[in-house]
Amino acid sequence: MIKKATLLALLSAALLAPTVVAAPGAAAAITAKRQGIDLTLTSVTPDYATERATEIKITGTVRNGGAAALSGLRVRVRYSAQRFPDRAAMATFAGDDTPVTLPPNVSSQSSTLIPELGANASQEFELTMTPAQFGLTSFGAYPLAVEVVQWDAVQLASQRTFLTYAPANGQQRPVRNRMAFVLPMIDQPRRADDGTFVDEKLSGALGGKGRLADLARIAEIAPEQVTWVVDPALFDDVEAMTKKFHVKAGNKREERPADPAAAQWLSSVRAALADNPVVATPYADPDVTALAHRGLDKQPARALELAKEKSALIKGDVLTSTYWPAGGMIDADALDLLAVGAPGVTRVDKVLLDAANLPTQQAASAVAMPPPSATPDAATRLDTVMGPVTALVADGELSRLLEPGAGTRATTLLSKQRFIAETAMIAAEPGQTRPRSLVVAPSRRWNPSPTVVSTLLKTAGKLPWLSLTTLDSIKVPAAPTPRAGLTYPDRSRKQELGGKYLKPIRELAEQAALTARLTGRQQSSFDAAVLRLTSSAWRGDTKAGRAVAEQVGKAVNDRIEKVSITGAGPDRPRTLAGSDGEVPISVRNQLDTPVSLYVDAKSDDPDVLEADVREPLRIDPGQSGTVQIGMQVIAPGGGDASVTVQLLTADRRPYGEPVKLIVRTTGYTGIALVIVGGALTVMLAAVVTRILRRRSQRRGARAARTRESETV
């Protein structure tokens, strides 16, 4: 009876005490906590065991965060002699937080007793074990946990991790798979038009512990096989800060001196990337799927052209033929646009995708099936309007290990142990006869811990079942894994830049293109600014994107207004004498380049005045030009007529706002006016003469009457 009561008490205590487990890459706390106890693992050495007698040492810290001392504590190891059957089982183990799913066996030899731990006190521990003690016999990944118990009965805290056993004298050596790390160096656009930064955040990111400064540190230590995906717009922005630049500050535009941090960052990154393969995103990392769905078909090609042009800011040999879509998701429409690319300049022949975008046929099957037992090769092919392209699928689980959250010592350790176990599990999967290709790629705007990333890169380079390689070296195998084709769900479409945001951007792009057509250029000086507005960085933050769009729109309008009609308007009427004639129209060019255009004039009152004229005009920089617009009076009595004057580009597109011109017509010819004027003059002279004669006669009569009166 006493035994039953004791057992019931122990089970009740275990069930009522919740477990918090730290999983690498999760946002949860790194240490497991229960009843004020924090358990943190600080080291596992060696990284993996190669002999049955290899001594494995685990160190860590137990901290009592409660207000009272705790007695009878023990730190011990739980294990299983059964290796994980597949990666799905590993994911389940790592994500579980219930005590009943911990490894079943408790090591009697690997434990440390802590007789008493005071309030707010910590105690370091060290545990040693061997594969032989745990009964490990074959290559693979095994579950392992460290727990803190009180009186060898009640669990207070636990931490799950993995133990990898790779016997050097095994019967069959594991296959050495190829692994390509793809690390992004992508920011959000920082400028509106080319001359104005929207804020000063870029400067902070470049120095100290800023995100871009951390990326530079990672680049300095990364192996030469690591492939970097960079946005040329980022280097364009930083390059602009190496000289005097302007920043929008409220309603003002303030000048700033050259930023030394910008020059230092560029120098260090260029040196670090000198020996690494570099892939450039289309300029400003545009949301290509959104552009394809919203009718902005020209922008992706222009982004590829600008990426090719601006990649010289990074290094000489930058690839622009590989594309990594936002979120790793793309559909057939966007892929076709990129496959066509910029004819004669560059096109996309390789894409890097998320596994959800290109699932295996087994994973995509509607029939309930177990998950794939083997990790598929990363490379396959996709059909486009330009023929097949290579598709590389990133491994989601391995990729998430690169950004587990806070870069503490415990985080780094757990990520490393999980990485070793995951890659060993892949190598141990049955049925392998030749190496497979794996791709690891974190999220594009990640905020990495240099310690975590550098540790995983170094670890990958040392594992005997991995071989580091570049992304470009991965080829499609002779028998690629059957995949279901591009899958683009509604949730991915909802994440795109929406039509409400892109519609004014499309109109702005059309207006910006006019500034180039007027000068005879193929490309607008606002192309880069427009592409920055289409950046995938504005996903989820279109409010900020719209604020930048307003600045770009003002800059475009200011440039358009530099070529304008002068001396005309409703308040400045022109007079047309006679039944026909010409009215001069002047156009001023305040640009620093010649312009060629047409002046188009049409009567708004054809019953009064006929005018439908289109005259060419070329104007040098800083000069004005004038054309004579022929008009004909239709109404016999003349009258006022409105004429709309519109500037047109060489391809007859309206440029700027139309101007209303009031023309006053008399209905008389010039000769008729002279005759009428002469007749009026003669008539006036006769009238004046007659008046003067009558005045003289009256004066004479008055004089005669005066003489008669004097005589009387």
Image (spheres, rainbow, N blue to C red):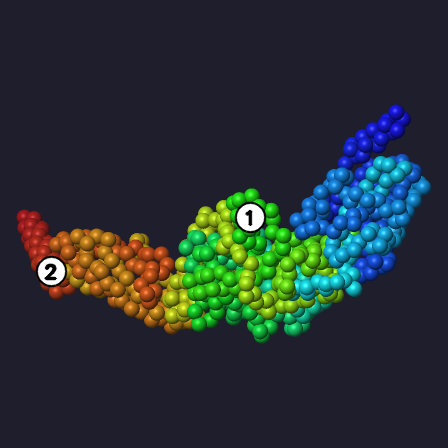
- Identify the residue at image location x=77%, y=36%: 18
- Identify the residue at image location x=52%, y=70%: 309
Of residue 520 and residue 221, the one placed in the foreground of this image is 221
10 Å crowding of disc 1: few (<14), some (14-19), many (20+)? few
Q: Is residue 183 left or right of residue 294?
A: right
Q: Amino acid at mark 1?
A: Gly
Q: Amino acid at mark 2?
A: Val
Q: Is residue 204 left or right of residue 128?
A: left
Q: Position of residue 139 (x, y in %)?
A: 75, 58
Q: CA distance from mark 2 to mark 1?
A: 75 Å
Q: Secondary structure at mark 1?
A: loop
- Identify the residue at image location x=89%, y=48%: 109
The outermost residue toward the bottom is 316
| Residue that carries the numbered disc 1 in the rendered image | 540
| Residue that carries the numbered disc 2 in the rendered image | 676
The outermost residue toward the top is 1
Of residue 172 and residue 363, the one placed in the foreground of this image is 172
Sequence order check, earlier mark of 2 and 1: 1
Which image quadrant: the N terminus? top right
Of residue 531 and residue 255, the one placed in the foreground of this image is 531
Q: Position of residue 516 (x, y in %)?
A: 41, 66
Residue 707 in view in this figure? no
- Identify the residue at image location x=83%, y=51%: 134
Q: Is residue 420 left or right of residue 532?
A: right
Q: Position of residue 69 (x, y in %)?
A: 91, 37
Q: Secondary structure at mark 2?
A: helix
Quadrant assignment, res 517 = bottom left
Of residue 226 and residue 170, the one placed in the foreground of this image is 170
